Amino acid sequence: MGETVLVFPAGMPEGLEYRDRARARGLRVVGASSVEADPAEGSYEAWERLPYVNDPGFDDVRRKAMSVVKKRTGQHEDTIRELSVAQGRGLVVGEALSQFSGVLTSVPQYHGEASELDRR
């Protein structure tokens, strides 16, 4: 699977324009919104619901690993990935976090080098 980008807020005109540019570059595009029933949801390959930007927990949610467990087509992906913010690109879905276990059980464990974890 190639690079994946997350567009947030996905339903705004700028988000829709960015989605189109990203697709033209061959990127997989995941839409996200804080709106409960965003009409743009159907125009993205995958969708995530995020809290409002001014919610106290937004920064924590943005930095947490994400698992894309449901796609509109193809097989389910069960890898855990980190979200990051890239200047001029918005939220980016990162590489798989393969050195963690138990992330979805609320008891995550890291099995890699400490220096690698600090880099994140």
Image: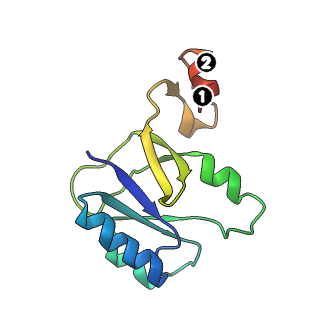
- Circle 2 crowding by C-alpha within 10 Å: few under 14, some 14–19, many from 20: few
Of residues 77 and 86, which is closer to you in this image?
A: 86
Q: Residue drawn 62% across and 47% down?
A: 63
Q: Is residue 60 left or right of residue 77?
A: right
Q: Quadrant of the C terminus?
A: top right
The residue that appears at 21% across and 54% down in the rendered structure is 74
In the depicted view, which residue is nearer to us: 49 or 20? Answer: 20
Q: Amino acid at mark 1?
A: Arg
Residue at point 60% right, 25% down? 117
Image location (x, y in percent) of residue 52: 67, 70
Identity of the residue furthest to the front in this view? 88
Tell me if residue 58 comes above or below residue 106 in the rendering.
below
Callout 1 touching callout 2 (CB < 8 Å) = yes
User: Horizontal and vertical percent for residue 17?
Assistant: 38, 77
Q: CA distance from mark 1 to mark 2?
A: 6 Å
Q: Is 30 displayed left or right of 102 in the figure?
A: left
In which quadrant is the N terminus drawn? top left
Task: Look at the numbered disc 1 and give the secondary structure of its residue.
Answer: helix
Quadrant of residue 106 within the rendered picture:
top right
Residue reaching furthest to the right? 56
Residue 71 on image: x %, y %: 31, 58
Q: Which residue is mark 2?
A: 115
Residue 30, position as x, y percentages in the image: 39, 62
Few, some or many residues within 10 Å of mark 1 (<14, 14–19, 20+): few
The disc labelled 2 sits on which kind of residue?
Ser
Q: Which residue is mark 1?
A: 119
